[in-house]
Image (cartoon, rainbow, N blue to C red):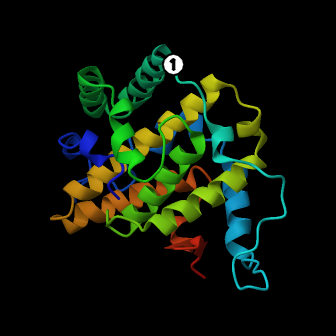
Amino acid sequence: MRYARIVVVGFVLCLPVSAGAQADFAGPLSPGAFEATLNMGPIAETLRRQMQRPVPRSNSGKQAPAATKPVSVADFRYTPSKSRRSANLENFVSKTKAVDPKGADTLAKLFASQDIIEAMRPPLARYGLRIDNVVDAYTVWLISSWQATRGTTDDPSPASTAAVRRQVMNAMASAAMVTTADDASKQEMAEALLLQAALVESAVEQSQSDPDQLQAVGRAAAQGARGMGIDLAGMTLTDRGMVSAH
């Protein structure tokens, strides 16, 4: 998926993903480095219920509207702050340094060289997604992580992207941690998800010629997702969104 990986090309090769490295990715791809995303279990649980539930159909054969309180993707936007972004990235580097000093130093240089989140705006816009929306950020992370476990960065169809976005929106609509969050909390969650997606996509892209490394990246993505309550192995991406693989 070409959401954001162009932003960090040249960075991920510094991560410990070689065949001889541990497959748990103790550094920037570790779920522990993304504190803002560690309490997203309720969102994952709602997504699982959506995947297991048959998609309702109207008499015309079209997907019937969900019988829930109407929500809009725009409800999950926030007003970003450059100072909050800087603080979020500094905190991420600090947490990474504790387990991967070399990776943390490279991240710090990367963040100093450009506004990595802002740089994602144009590639995301091509999918109708925004950098200042926590639903869109989760959508990007979920699809990118799922693709990493399959060793691919192919562009998903517009239909599948839109369908996953709807699933995430519906899941977040019932998650108090999102609906009651202020702009600062939404920004912290969204930017952690976007950054992780960018790192994962770049790692997959740069590991295409190294099967062992590619598998290590996939395991790291799966481990990170499990830390957020998501079992990527149990999902399949379709034009109807994420569906159960079982």
Residue pictured at 70% horizontal, 48% vertical:
172
Q: In which quarter of the image is residue 48?
A: bottom right
72 on left or right of 132: right
| Residue 41 % position (x, y) | 68, 50
**On screen, residue 62 above or below 156:** below
What residue is disc 1 on? 81
**On screen, residue 129 above or below 155:** above
Dot 1 falls on a residue whose secondary structure is loop
Q: Quadrant of residue 120?
A: top left
Residue pictured at 66% horizontal, 56% vertical:
44
Q: Quadrant of the C terminus?
A: bottom right
| Residue 86 % position (x, y) | 42, 18
Residue pictured at 43% horizontal, 54% vertical:
127
Outermost residue, front side: 60
- Amino acid marked by disc 1: Ser
237, 124: nearer the viewer: 124
Q: In which quarter of the image is the N terminus?
A: bottom left
| Residue 40 % position (x, y) | 65, 45
Report the number of numbered marks: 1
